[in-house]
Image (cartoon, coloured by chain):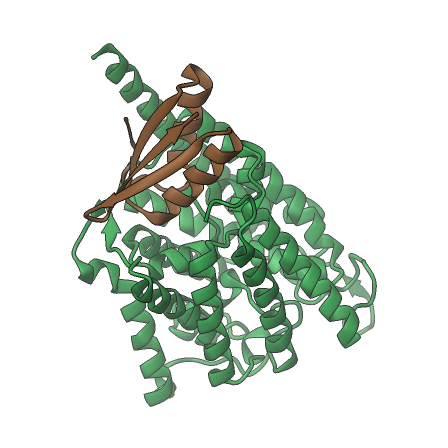
Chain colours: A brown, B green
């Protein structure tokens, strides 16, 4: 799981991009702590043909990307 | 939320364009309906942080943008007090972004507004802005980060919104404690209530849409994500069409544009500094105001850095001088004094150090993590 909590825009998306380019995972989870990050990662993931879902826990979000 | 283009971004872009046209029609300086750098500089002047007599006014637009963001963030439960991501570095970056903007004579938002007004000097600025963004992207791809922020007490999150409320109260209750320009750009302003209400609406919209001038180009280049850049285009088109309809548009030219100079090298370099610094900060000056409104203490520090940068720019003669017609009718293209040129050079050196140091550190940490 990528922990991108507290990182400002667009670092969390850069982290996801690096992982996708390096390992092309079928499933990837990312932990963030703002809705902006959820939106940005979701847009990037959709462009990479991933299905995206997320759940909120105590102000933090776990985003799941699936091929 | 995950559509390729979020309609809110375009709505906000159009709203910003319309707001700029309305505020200009009601008294704000030409091609300066909304300029974050100029308005923070005016606030720095009104609070006597600098003494340039022509640029001093408590701009309600800044107050409204921050508070509009705060209100919307509270209503949508997105207000979160966070801080701790290299605040001193952000302060310095904010100051140099401001110096770059005042060398060019406008923040990225005013750059787009100037472009829509037919100011070709601003297109040169756009080229510089793009170059700066590309430099910033280079370091982002190499691993640049100002590290993470943490949840902090709400008192940290409400620092800048509180400061804005304080400024508004003082401006209404005891305006004599401030200095207001009697001539020049600082003396030109729309009525307080109109400016405030419009800015509150734009602040709320910008909070929803995440509109960001630097984010548009950055995301398009890095991720082929054209969401934010659609807001950038919407502002330009709205301003251009609005100026044509209102009869303000006189064609595209570099000659004698409102509060602009034709020293193209410095239009370019000033905006390189703004683009690069804004990418490192994670957002343009407008976005920093909106983030500060949402409770981001790091962005609040950045805004304070921008205010101090503006004070330095005018106390030390770093800002650009606008083109003008002299009394004998000769054309003065305006430009930058030597001090301003040196400040831009120092700015590049500082940004390079910040970029390299924070990239190397991140790389080292990454390698250590891989070993573990």
Residue under the image location 33 percent in, 59 percent down: B294
For the residue pair B75 and A65, the one nearer the viewer reads as: A65
Residue under the image location 47 percent in, 41 percent down: B279
Task: Say left or right for B364 vs B30.
Answer: left
Residue under the image location 51 percent in, 40 percent down: B276
Residue B162 in sight here: yes
Whether A49 is drawn above or below B321: the answer is above
Whether B50 is drawn above or below B215: the answer is below
For the residue pair A48 and B281, the one nearer the viewer reads as: A48
Q: Quadrant of residue B129?
A: top right
Label count reads 0
In the image, residue B83 lies at what x, y percent? 25, 49
Task: Say left or right for B84 vs B242.
Answer: left
In the image, residue B98 lies at what x, y percent? 48, 54
Check the picture and name the quadrant holding the C terminus of chain B. top left
In the image, residue B220 lies at what x, y percent? 58, 38
Q: Quadrant of residue B350?
A: top left
In the image, residue B38 lies at what x, y percent? 52, 64
Residue B274 in sight here: no
Task: Say left or right for B182 vs B304.
Answer: right
């Amino acid at each position: 799981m990528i922990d991108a909590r507290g990182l400002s825009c667009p670092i969390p998306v850069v982290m996801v991009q690096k992982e996708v380019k390096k390992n092309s995972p079928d499933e990837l989870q990312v932990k963030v702590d703002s809705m902006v990050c959820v939106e940005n990662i979701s847009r990037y993931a959709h462009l990479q043909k991933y299905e995206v879902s997320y759940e909120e826990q105590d102000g933090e979000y776990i985003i799941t990307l699936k091929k | 939320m995950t559509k390729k283009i979020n309609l809110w971004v375009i709505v906000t872009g159009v709203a910003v364009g319309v707001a700029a046209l309305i505020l200009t029609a009601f008294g704000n300086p030409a091609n300066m309906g909304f300029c974050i750098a100029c308005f923070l500089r005016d606030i720095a002047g009104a609070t006597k942080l600098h003494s340039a007599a022509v640029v001093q006014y408590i701009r309600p637009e800044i107050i409204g943008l921050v508070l509009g963001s705060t209100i919307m963030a509270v209503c949508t439960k997105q207000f979160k007090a966070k801080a701790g991501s290299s605040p001193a570095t952000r302060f310095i970056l904010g100051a140099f972004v401001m110096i770059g903007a005042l060398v060019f004579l406008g923040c990225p938002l005013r750059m787009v507004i100037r472009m829509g007004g037919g100011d070709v000097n601003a297109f040169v600025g756009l080229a510089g802005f793009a170059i700066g963004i590309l430099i910033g992207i280079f370091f982002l791809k190499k691993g640049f980060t100002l590290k993470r922020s943490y949840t902090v007490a709400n008192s940290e999150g409400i620092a800048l919104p509180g400061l804005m409320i304080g400024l508004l109260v003082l401006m209404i209750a005891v305006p004599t404690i401030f200095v207001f320009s009697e001539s020049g750009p600082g003396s030109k302003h729309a009525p307080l209530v109109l400016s405030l209400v419009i800015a509150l609406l734009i602040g709320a919209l910008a909070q929803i849409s995440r509109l960001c001038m630097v984010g548009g180009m950055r995301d398009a280049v890095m991720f082929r994500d054209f969401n934010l850049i659609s807001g950038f285009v919407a502002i330009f088109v709205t301003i251009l069409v609005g100026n044509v309809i209102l009869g303000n548009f006189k064609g595209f030219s570099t000659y004698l544009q409102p509060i602009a100079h034709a020293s193209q090298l410095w239009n370019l370099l000033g905006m390189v500094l703004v683009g690069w610094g804004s990418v490192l900060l994670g957002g343009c000056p407008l976005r920093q105001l909106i983030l500060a409104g949402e409770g981001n203490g790091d962005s609040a520090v950045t805004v304070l850095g921008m205010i101090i940068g503006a004070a330095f720019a005018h106390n030390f003669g770093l800002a650009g001088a606008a083109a003008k017609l002299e009394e004998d009718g000769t054309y003065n293209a305006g430009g930058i004094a030597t001090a301003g040129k040196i400040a831009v050079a120092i700015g590049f050196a500082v940004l390079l150090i910040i970029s390299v140091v924070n990239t190397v550190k991140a790389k080292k940490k990454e390698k250590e993590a891989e070993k573990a």
